[in-house]
Image (tube, helix red, strand yellow):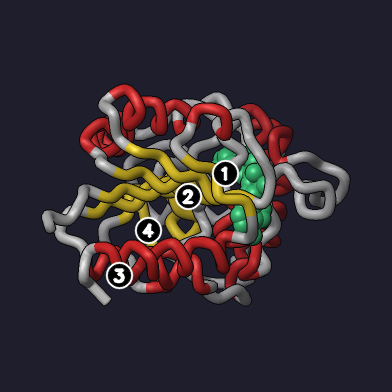
Amino acid sequence: MTLPRLVALTGAGVSAASGVPTFRSAEGGLWRRHRPEELATPSAFARDPALVWEFYDWRRQLIAGCRPNPAHLTLAEMDALLPHFTLITQNVDGLHHQAGSRRVLCLHGDIWWLKCSRCHYREENHTVPLRPLPPLCPCCEAYLRPDVVWFGEALSPSVLSRATEACAEADILLVIGTSALVYPAAQLPFYTLQHRGRVYEFNTEPTPLSGHVTESILGPCEETLPAWWCDFQNEYGLA
Ligand code: APR
């Protein structure tokens, strides 16, 4: 049997069981009474770079103590076993890489990379806590910023077009742990559906996407995704 082209799109829910707070949950969405939508913006950084960096330094310290869970590990196994597989993530936490996934499209950037707010300098940096805050560019001494996509900023056109293409060509798209509210990521499942691909959603609760998908699998993805993968492997003789 020919193996289908499989694509996975993940959001904050895939890292919830690892202890990374999701964005829109009551307990995890706030830092010092600020909402992420107020801090993760170019204007907040222009106004108060130290405050924005304190927020990211706090997130980096929190994430540094987190480890991949069975959902991340299942996706890494798919990456290793399937010839046609693409993982698209909205997460910036680096846990997919830590789990061993190699083919990852980071739609919203990566919190472990810094880039200069003025020149083209970029560096991978895992130091926690990061000091001094804000860090300075070694080339031009402007402020470095996290290499993540902030509210009001455009996604990398090349990453977005590769993600769009992968979804349009997918036989099966797995949408895992995302509230499906933030565009353009929320549009991606519709490219698969338009091309008659199947879309399976894994979430603890229904989302605006649920009414459109082939099947909505309710429950924690660290349990439901490994179970789905087990059935898939049996069906295609991979087990
Ligand atoms: N298993 C499956 N789903 C879960 C789990 C779990 N264990 N825990 C939470 N969820 C679901 C929630 O029900 C919710 O639908 O994960 C989703 C998390 O939604 P958000 O917090 O909105 O995160 P996300 O969809 O990734 O947000 C998209 O918005 O703030 C921006 O750039 C940020 O990448 C982020 C984007």
Could you say where residue 38 lies in the image, as x and y percent from the top left?
73, 33
Q: Which residue is mark 1?
A: 178
Q: Earlier in the sequence, mark 4 or mark 3?
A: 4
In-image side of 127 versus 191 (left or right): right
In-image side of 167 versus 114 (left or right): left
Residue 174 seen in render = yes
Viewer-nearest of discs 3 and 1: 3
**Three-letter amino acid code at the position of disc 3:** Asn
**Three-letter amino acid code at the position of disc 2:** Thr
Helix or strand or loop: what does disc 4 sit on? strand
In space, the residues marked 2 and 3 are separated at their CA atoms by 24 Å
Q: Earlier in the sequence, mark 1 or mark 2?
A: 2
In space, the residues marked 4 and 3 are separated at their CA atoms by 42 Å
In the image, 105 versus 193, the foreground residue is: 193
Q: Which residue is mark 3?
A: 234
Check mark 4 vs ligand 1: CB closer than 8 Å? yes or no: no
Q: How many numbered tags mark residues here?
A: 4
Residues under numbered marks 3 and 1 in contact, where contact means CB atoms less than 8 Å apart: no
Any mark on residue 123, and which?
A: 4
